[in-house]
Image (tube, rainbow, N blue to C red):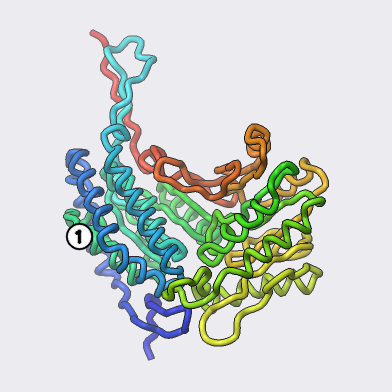
Amino acid sequence: MVTHAYRTENPATGEVVRTFQEHTNEEVQVAIDRAHAAASTWAATPVAERAVLLGRVATAYRERSTELADAIALEMGKPLKQAAGEVELAASIYAWYAENAERLLADRELEQAEGAQRSVLRTEPLGALLGIMPWNYPYYQVARFAAPNILLGNTILLKHAQICAGSAQLMEDLFTEAGAPEGVYANLRMSNEQAAEVIADPRVRGVSLTGSERAGAAVAEQAGKHLKKAVLELGGSDPMIVLDDADVESVARTMAKARMSNCGQACNSPKRMFVPRASFDRCVETLVAGVEKQVVGDPRTEGTHIGPMSSAQAKEDLLEQVRDAVEKGATVHTGGAGIEGPGAFVQPTVLSGITPQMRAWSEELFGPVAMVFPYDDLDEAVAQANDSSYGLSGSVWTGDPERGAEVADRLEVGMAYVNEHGTTMPALPFGGVKNSGFGRELASFGVEEFANHKLVRVAAR
């Protein structure tokens, strides 16, 4: 029996709905040939024309929103309302780069031009790039990488997660139907070994990965070995610090929604909540109530708030982390187990009493599990929030935004928020520090990461 690595397996039922053939080594080489050949002509295409393509892609996402949302609800279990929201977010990214194209790629006159008529910095493309994308936000993650780089004039080879083969093919179809020239965007179903060969190929000039630390380390090693630029967006264990002047019950209700969104499978989800001890019990009580009221079920059924995890393996990995915490003394306020029956469903869970001896203290819990920590001193809370190998984002919740900003400045993260968490918009940079990776996506940074910042200096006669 042939096992297909690329397949649509409904995580709500465990049923394999569709399988996909992997691309052969020869087909991968043809794709690289085309991306490399297209790079020079696409870079020479006027910026306005490249922007038109992105605008058409944005329109296509919006026109086919229902189809696109249903595809990822089936593939990875995202509830339809959240899936439609992701489709619109991806569309907004393509549209933003289309609308801001000329500004983002304008030449920059340099002030220190002594001895010259002018010194100009130009932003030019590098060539063909490889993107390795995860399953948790199938459209949004690709848009963050593809939109700015296609605008810049780079060409894209895309290796998506194996469980997202259907939506990955849809994205390639959208680009083709929007008029992308051959070689500008190609979806490749290939193994990790094939991906390593693509990174090694001298015609491929950079690689962007969103995924696990392990995958990031492997890609960074291969990219470094071949002197390729890399951008890595890895995991996170985001802190959420509630100050003593906050409306703790309102914040706890926000916690419940934010933590359980996408079944808790978001790198920048608030995973560790730090609450003043005097407010701890009220916070936990409200958080539990907010978690328990959310409906767990078929993601393609209206009214479902929390779908299944992406796979049976993801479910088991998360439950092992929860069991480890409970066996070592953690308190389960609600949930804490899998849901019997078909599908990769896990009970939404709230834990407290997490200690350094538990895996949950240092590991990312990528699923519907919230951890709440009481604190007596704000300095202690900040120190504990920063006591993590991750540094993606974090938030501070308070009735005094200025005070909140001062605390947010102390967080060792790439993105710090006050009275919100995980906000993502096309014009806001996205990325982290420490083991959460390096490089930035979105905003002007998305255009500048895989660029040749060329100095053009014209000397005075």
Which residue of the protein is positioned furthest toward the top in this rendering?
A: 461
When the figure is inspected, residue 342 is found, relative to residue 158, above or below; the finding is below
Q: Residue at x 38, y 81 (%)?
A: 4
Residue 460 location in percent, x, y?
26, 10
Q: Position of residue 350 (x, y in %)?
A: 69, 66
Quadrant of image for the N terminus = bottom left
User: Can residue 375 be seen in the rendering of this structure?
Assistant: yes
**Res. 406 image quadrant:** top right
User: Quick one: label 1, few (<14), some, or many (20+) residues within 10 Å?
Assistant: some
Helix, strand or loop status at disc 1: helix
Q: Which residue is mark 1?
A: 176
Question: What residue is drawn where x is 29% and y is 24%?
Answer: 456
Q: Nearer the viewer, residue 209 or 348?
A: 348
Q: Is residue 24 above or below residue 230?
A: below
Q: Residue flagged by tag 1: what amino acid is it?
A: Thr
Asked if residue 288 lies left or right of residue 316, the reply is: right
User: Residue 119 or 459: which is nearer the viewer?
Assistant: 119
Q: Residue at x 19, y 52 (%)?
A: 37
| Lateral position of residue 254 relative to residue 325, left or right | left
Residue 288 position, x and y percent, is 68, 65
Q: Nearer the viewer, residue 23 or 376?
A: 376
In the displayed structure image, the side of residue 121 where residue 136 appears, left or right: right
